[in-house]
Amino acid sequence: MSFWQLQDGTEAQTSTSFESGGGDIQPIPNNTQLIAAIEEAKWADYQGDSYINLKWRVMRPAEYANRVLFHKVKVFGMATDKDKAAVADKAKMMLRAIDANCGGKLSRLNEAPNDMDLMTALVGKPMAIKVQVWDMDGKKGNWISAVAPAKAPQSHPTPNTAQAQPAAQQRAPQGQPQRAPLQSAQLDDDLPF
């Protein structure tokens, strides 16, 4: 069997041009709430500006599952340029919230995180995000306007609900809260936005 054999048994023809078809993927609508996780986090540069590039993979709802969103977190600004400084401040607050949802590892650093710090701290933790649509020079895409925990924290149990908890959780030592692993059913709960 030849490497160039197609599924129908014929061989791919030699040609200097090919178009696979398909179409433009439309952006996810404004104010859509999703559950997503970062699958890549690293520094990038564009025209002399350094920023953190986050690659998010959508998990829920099913109609957008596996869509990829790129998030430029522009944490550096210039004090002389008030607009860039304001963008940088918002970006740092966004990064801090993302980090808090992922366990807070970056917040312990005083210096800018490196690529390994970003990957270790941010990758693989599901969280709720809200997306908006950008439209520039005839092109459209999504940007992330808000992040929150994947599931809103529950209130303290009442005496009746405490009895319904498994005995193993009731015997947890004080000062060491039990944290249940994130189940996929939890991801379907109402989003916090």
Image (cartoon, rainbow, N blue to C red):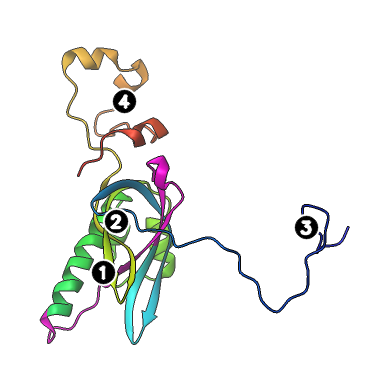
- Which numbered marker is on residue 99? 2
Q: Which residue is mark 1?
A: 110
Q: Amino acid at mark 3?
A: Leu
Of circles 1 and 3, the one toward us is 3
In the image, what residue occupies the spot 17% across and 29% down? 155
Tell me how far mark 1 sits from mark 3, CA to CA: 55 Å
Question: Residue 14 lies in what quarter of the image?
Answer: bottom right
Tell me how far mark 2 sits from mark 3, CA to CA: 46 Å
In terms of sequence position, does the residue under pointer 4 or pointer 3 come before the other? 3
Q: Amino acid at mark 1?
A: Asn
Question: Residue 56 lies in what quarter of the image?
Answer: bottom left
Of circles 2 and 4, the one toward us is 2
Picture layout, residue 180 above or below residue 143: above
Local crowd at mark 1 within 10 Å, few (<14), some, or many (≥20)? few
Q: Is residue 65 visible?
A: yes
Q: Which residue is mark 4?
A: 172
In terms of sequence position, does the residue under pointer 1 or pointer 4 come before the other? 1
